[in-house]
Image (tube, grey):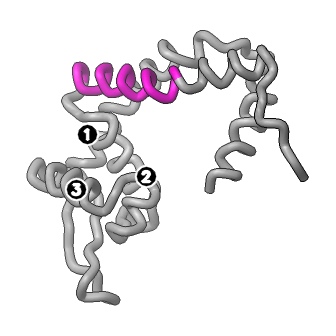
Amino acid sequence: MAYDDTLTAQEERLWRALMRVIVALPRSLDEDLLRSTGLTLTEYVVLMNLSEAENQELRMADLAAATALSPSRITRVVDTLQSRGQVAKRRYAGDARGNVASLTPEGLQRLQAAYPVHLASARKHVIDHLDGRSLPAMVRQFEAVVENLD
């Protein structure tokens, strides 16, 4: 099946707006979190993924994949969180070369304190600017995009 590479004017507007969102939104969310909680958006996402994992722990490779970070970047973030007592890191029993990161009680407490700030930021920067009647369709459409990316 051949596709036409050109976009309609409306498709072009959507694409350009989405590209601006991809660049600007993480910066805005990061600034709000950092200013209010001392956590970066990346640290928040790491803590969130650990909190949702079985036993609140993940192999480092799985955590890197879940957060879309490189292995070296996830190591630096986890090391920073470990130095603050929010994450513990240990060798993975099934593979001496791998490590497991686990959420500590302090990390969970820090995440829970940051959660309302993150939601308020998401509401301020995104949700409040959307037509609520369009949300069900938008959810389905963006989930389809994500599914295609995964």
Q: Which mark is residue 149?
A: none
Residue at x 34% of width, y 57% of height:
70
53 is higher (above) or lower (below) than 115: below
Image point 69% across, 20% down: which residue? 14
Instruction: State which region is magenta.
Output: 20-36
* Identity, as a three-letter code, of the amino acid under mark 3: Val
Residue 34 within the magenta-colored segment of the rendering: yes
Residue at mark 1: 110
Give whichever of 61, 132 is nearer the camera. Answer: 61
Q: To which residue does mark 3 refer?
A: 78
Residue 72 within the segment the image draws in magenta: no
Residue 117 visible in rendering: no
Foreground disc of the pair 1, 2: 2
The 10 Å Cα crowd at callout 2, few under 14, some 14 to 19, many 20 or more, is: few
Tell me how far mark 1 sits from mark 3, CA to CA: 14 Å
Mark 1 vs 2: CB contact within 8 A: no
Q: Secondary structure beneath disc 1?
A: helix
Amino acid type at image mark 1: Arg
Q: Nearer the viewer, mark 3 or mark 2?
A: 2
Q: Nearer the viewer, mark 1 or mark 3?
A: 3
Position above or below: 145 against 10: below
What's the mark number on residue 68?
2
Q: Amino acid at mark 2?
A: Ala
Q: Residue at x 38, y 24 (%)?
A: 29
Question: Which label's residue is closer to the chain start, 3 or 2?
Answer: 2
Q: Crowdedness of circle 1 by 10 Å Cα count: few (<14), some, many (20+)?
A: some
Q: Earlier in the sequence, mark 1 or mark 2?
A: 2
Task: Give whichever of 5, 34 is nearer the camera.
Answer: 5
Residue 90 picture location, percent across and down: 20, 74
Q: Position of residue 24 (x, y in %)?
A: 43, 21
Q: Position of residue 145 (x, y in %)?
A: 70, 43
